[in-house]
Image (spheres, helix red, strand yellow):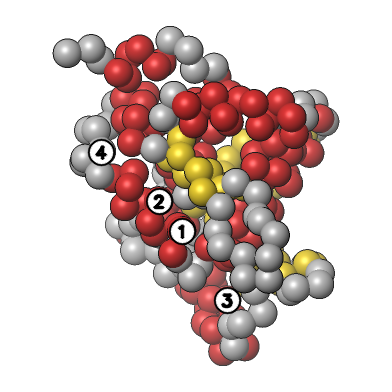
């Protein structure tokens, strides 16, 4: 039986592998997001994404738009792509049907707009870095990675911090590098639906993390509405 992972790896570029890792870690992206972050033009992105879809390493869908018209394609990982990423990371292969379950999650998820908003924030940074050599998005962690026990413990930190269940669940964590200077940060993305008490609860979690010896990094609250997005 041919090894489909080995066969498809021979035609994937470094950029393709990064795209597959993003889809694995961050769920779903639109064509414009991926084009801005990774490609020299929208046309180039559309052609390459069509090729990756044909290779069955990515899958795509268009959400229903009740007021007419159509959304751009939304891309998710396909089964073969998930197997490629697992091989690159020396992890067990995903279970059969993993990609189908993942796709259904995003095509039906009420949190789709929230996830696209979070990913749009980071792809905007990546797109800026792509055309500005002195800048780089040197780390981008999803919520799931941030929630892991000891996620923000560093070498030399107290053992208790390594064993600490994170009291925070940011929508993302990144490190932005400018001319060699690094700025780690947490992102909290809000669509305007969270009550003030929930925002205060989140701030208490960051205070608890710092009190336990964790990092004291800036927390960016990004508020998005139908008409504008601002800090």
For residue 94, which numbered disc appears in the image? 4
Q: How many marks?
A: 4
* Whole-percent x, y for residue 50 in the image: 57, 29
Residue at 55 percent of width and 19 percent of height: 14
Q: Earlier in the sequence, mark 3 or mark 1?
A: 1
Residue at 23 percent of width and 12 percent of height: 2
Q: Earlier in the sequence, mark 4 or mark 2?
A: 4
Q: Earlier in the sequence, mark 4 or mark 3?
A: 4
Say few, some or many: other residues with alpha carbon within 10 Å of mark 3 (under 14 / 14 to 19 / 20 or more): some
Q: Give the number of the mark in front: 1 or 4.
A: 1
Q: Which residue is mark 2?
A: 103
* Whole-percent x, y for residue 8 in the image: 39, 17
Q: What distance separates the C-alpha of mark 4 from that of mark 3?
A: 36 Å
Residue at 33 percent of width and 56 percent of height: 149
Say few, some or many: other residues with alpha carbon within 10 Å of mark 4 (under 14 / 14 to 19 / 20 or more): some
Q: What distance separates the C-alpha of mark 4 from that of mark 2?
A: 14 Å
Q: Secondary structure at mark 2?
A: helix
Could you tell me if residue 221 is visible in this image? no
Q: Nearer the viewer, residue 118 or 196?
A: 118
Could you tell me if residue 17 is visible in this image? yes
Q: Nearer the viewer, residue 70 or 89?
A: 70
Where, by quadrant of the figure, is residue 147 drawn? bottom left
Say few, some or many: other residues with alpha carbon within 10 Å of mark 2 (under 14 / 14 to 19 / 20 or more): many
For residue 203, which numbered disc appears in the image? 3
Q: What distance separates the C-alpha of mark 1 from that of mark 4?
A: 20 Å
Q: Which residue is mark 1?
A: 107
Q: Dots 1 and 2: beta carbons under 8 Å? A: yes
Q: Give the number of the mark in front: 4 or 3.
A: 4
Q: Give the number of the mark in front: 2 or 3.
A: 2
Q: What distance separates the C-alpha of mark 2 from that of mark 3?
A: 33 Å
């Amino acid at each position: 039986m041919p090894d489909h992972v080995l066969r498809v790896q021979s035609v994937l570029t470094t950029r393709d592998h990064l795209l597959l890792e993003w889809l694995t870690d961050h769920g779903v992206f639109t064509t414009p997001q991926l084009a801005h972050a990774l490609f020299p033009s929208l046309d180039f992105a559309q052609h390459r994404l069509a090729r990756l879809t044909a290779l069955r390493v990515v899958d795509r869908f268009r959400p229903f738009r009740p007021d007419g018209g159509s959304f751009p394609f939304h891309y998710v990982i396909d089964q073969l792509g998930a197997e490629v990423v697992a091989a690159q990371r020396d992890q067990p292969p995903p279970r059969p049907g993993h990609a189908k379950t993942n796709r259904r999650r995003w095509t039906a998820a009420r949190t789709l707009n929230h996830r696209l908003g979070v990913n749009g924030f980071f792809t905007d940074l990546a797109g800026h870095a792509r055309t500005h050599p002195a800048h780089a998005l040197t780390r981008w962690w999803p919520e799931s990675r941030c929630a892991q026990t000891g996620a923000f413990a560093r070498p030399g930190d107290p053992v208790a911090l390594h064993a600490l269940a994170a009291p925070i669940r940011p929508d993302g964590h990144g490190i932005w590098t400018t001319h060699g200077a690094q700025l780690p940060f947490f992102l909290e993305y809000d669509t305007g639906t969270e009550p003030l008490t929930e925002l205060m609860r989140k701030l208490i979690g960051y205070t608890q993390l710092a009190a336990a010896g964790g990092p004291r990094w800036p927390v960016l609250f990004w508020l998005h509405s139908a008409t504008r997005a601002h800090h």
